Amino acid sequence: MLAAATQCPNWQRACQQVAIESELYRLAGDVSQDDVLHLLTKLNQDESVHGVLVQLPLPATVDAEVVLRSVWPSKDVDAFHPENVGRIVQGTPRFLPCTPQGIQELLLRNGIETAGRHVVVLGRSDIVGRPMANMLSNRGVGGDATVTLCHSKTEDLPEMTRQADLLIVAIGRPRFVTAEMVKRGAAVIDVGINRTADGLVGDVDFESVCEVASAITPVPGGVGPLTVAMLLRNTLFAARQG
């Protein structure tokens, strides 16, 4: 059973398709932190619940760090608990965070090599950028890359991104990365999803970057479905571990 506090139904439909029982907890916007922690205690102690996903961001009335630390590491299927984060850094993960794991699977299944390649990760969030950098630099299949982690304080950002054999963009700025920022022949993974007057767009200017990239993910329909698939994989693993 996957229990979650979220307003996004995509994972619910996916659970139904693979016969995973799921339950959605919709909490009020002014919910108290004590109420959230009480719910998490209940889910942690329920032996029929194998995975707990807390959908971020949380209301201003709730301390997200306290909440994420309150999910038992063995049920933390999006790998936010400090114990699970530490294991990723050590290269001995229990779970891998869903979006970075989906990106890694995408690279492996499309034959995009990471070993020895220069990967530039644009964005240092705890959800994508930081774990992605750790996973790609770890030893083994899907890793062994030389990783540069860039962010808003990086000087001469276009010069840095043009060095990438593989560019992973997760900064939350619509169409921020243009063709002039990408080395010809590089692979580009666009993690962004931004609502604009033109509809949903990524952090990469897809049309212009298509002209120089050897491979590029679309938005929507690229990384997003893989994130959900990895959530289901982690939940199954958690259930098997008991």
Image: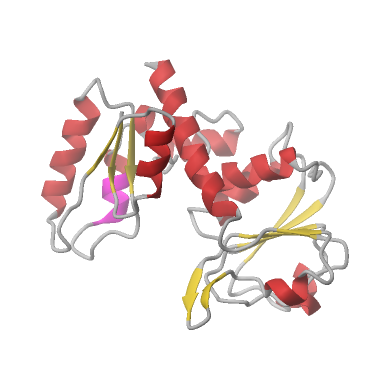
Q: Quadrant of residue 61?
A: bottom left
Frontmost residue, 233 versus 198:
198
Residue lying at 73% horizontally and 79% vertically, measured from the top left: 156
| Residue 55 x, y percent position in the rendering | 34, 51
| Residue 60 x, y percent position in the rendering | 23, 66
Above or below — where is 184 with respect to 18? below
Residue 116 is at least partly visible in this image: yes
Decide if residue 2 is on the left or right side of residue 139: left
Q: Is residue 86 magenta?
A: no
Residue lying at 25% horizontally and 22% vertically, measured from the top left: 48
* Residue at the front extreme of this rendering: 17
| Residue 65 x, y percent position in the rendering | 32, 51
Q: Quadrant of residue 158?
A: bottom right
Above or below — where is 223 with respect to 106? below
Question: Which quadrant, please, contains the N terminus?
Answer: top left
Above or below — where is 217 with respect to 141? below
| Magenta span of residues | 63-68
Residue 143 is at least partly visible in this image: no
Residue lying at 21% horizontally and 38% vertically, measured from the top left: 40
* Residue at the bottom extreme of this rendering: 197
Decide if residue 217 is on the left or right side of residue 90: right
Frontmost residue, 49 versus 13:
13
Question: Which quadrant, please, contains the C terminus?
Answer: top left
Q: Identify the colour scheme used.
A: secondary structure
| Residue 216 x, y percent position in the rendering | 73, 60
Frontmost residue, 27 versus 45:
27
Decide if residue 78 is on the left or right side of residue 181: left
Magenta span: helix, strand or loop, mainly? helix
Decide if residue 54 is on the left or right side of residue 28: right
Numbered-mark total:
0
